[in-house]
Amino acid sequence: MKSMLRALSVVALFVSSACVGQEAVELPPLVDEHGEEIIATFSIVGLDPETEEVGVAVQSRAFRAGAIVSYAKAGVGAVATQASANQSYGPRGLELLEQGLSPADVVERLTSADEGRARRQLAVIDARGRVKAYTGSETRDWAGHIEGENYSVQGNILASEAVVRAMAEAFESSTGVLAERFMDALDAGQAAGGDSRGKQSGGILIVKPIGDSGRTTDRWVDIRVDDHATPFLEMRRLMEMAVERNARTRGR
């Protein structure tokens, strides 16, 4: 098993050279030395207390980051799991929130039981807007997070700390529905340097109690761009379509 993981690491670290003419294009590592997917990214978890919308938005120079990072459940909260992503943090984190644990307790419970916690990055928000983020000591520079009122922004392998600072400022100052504020935060993070390896994928997942909207799912906005040369433009296009559709439904 160990030899297979080493082989995967070698492939992930050095495969990733594709030749275009005489030039080699370096692609980012796919997995770390433990065989875990590297989701170098910046993300935000947030809540709109008026509409009860809660969710996650993310962008990364990694394939299908939205599918890996984002977890949310209406009336419960949201989880973002990234860096050497432990995808069990998502469903397990929501389960613990639903049991009544605070985000701080959830983060402690998840990371304390994980031998790989030093490689993880995690953010948790509950339906009351309480947040807790965690950046492991072995995540790659620049890595860190900012916790604010009803949100947390976090990232790893970023151009600098300015990325998360720009995201926080944009989210706090922006207006509109939660999806629009998330998109503003992502755009601000990219303008400040973003993922130091570039851009490729992203997503926005927002859930909301069904109420009398006539829906059968709590997913209010669920868009993903798994692989795109200009993911921010494509995400905004899809986000605007989702917001317009929601505005036409009952329960806003």
Image (cartoon, grey):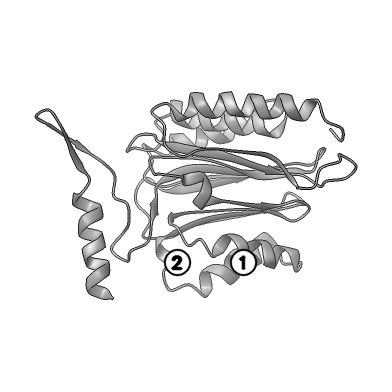
Which residue in the protein does label 2 denote?
117
**Residue 38 visible here:** yes
> Which numbered disc flags the more N-terminal residue, 2 or 1?
1
Helix, strand or loop at mark 1: helix
The disc label shown at residue 80, or none: none
Around disc 2, counting alpha carbons within 10 Å, would you say few (fewer than 14), some (14 to 19), or many (20 or more)?
A: many
* Image vertical order of residue 31 relative to residue 172, above or below: below
**Residue 149 visible here:** no
Percent across and percent down for residue 43 are: 52, 43
Q: Residue at x 67, y 61 (%)?
A: 94
Q: In this view of the protein, which residue sits in the foreground, 31 or 174?
A: 31
Nearer mark to the viewer, of 2 and 1: 1
Percent across and percent down for residue 39 are: 41, 50
Percent across and percent down for residue 168 are: 57, 36
| Left or right: 66 as drawn, with respect to 10 | right
Q: Residue at x 39, y 31 (%)?
A: 193
Which residue in the protein does label 1 denote?
92
* Quadrant the N terminus occupies: bottom left
* Image vertical order of residue 10 relative to residue 156, above or below: below
The residue under label 1 is which amino acid type?
A: Arg
* Image vertical order of residue 180 relative to residue 195, above or below: above
Helix, strand or loop at mark 2: helix
Percent across and percent down for residue 42 are: 47, 42
The answer for how far apart the CA atoms under marks 2 and 1 are is: 15 Å
User: Looking at the image, which residue sits at the far right?
Assistant: 212
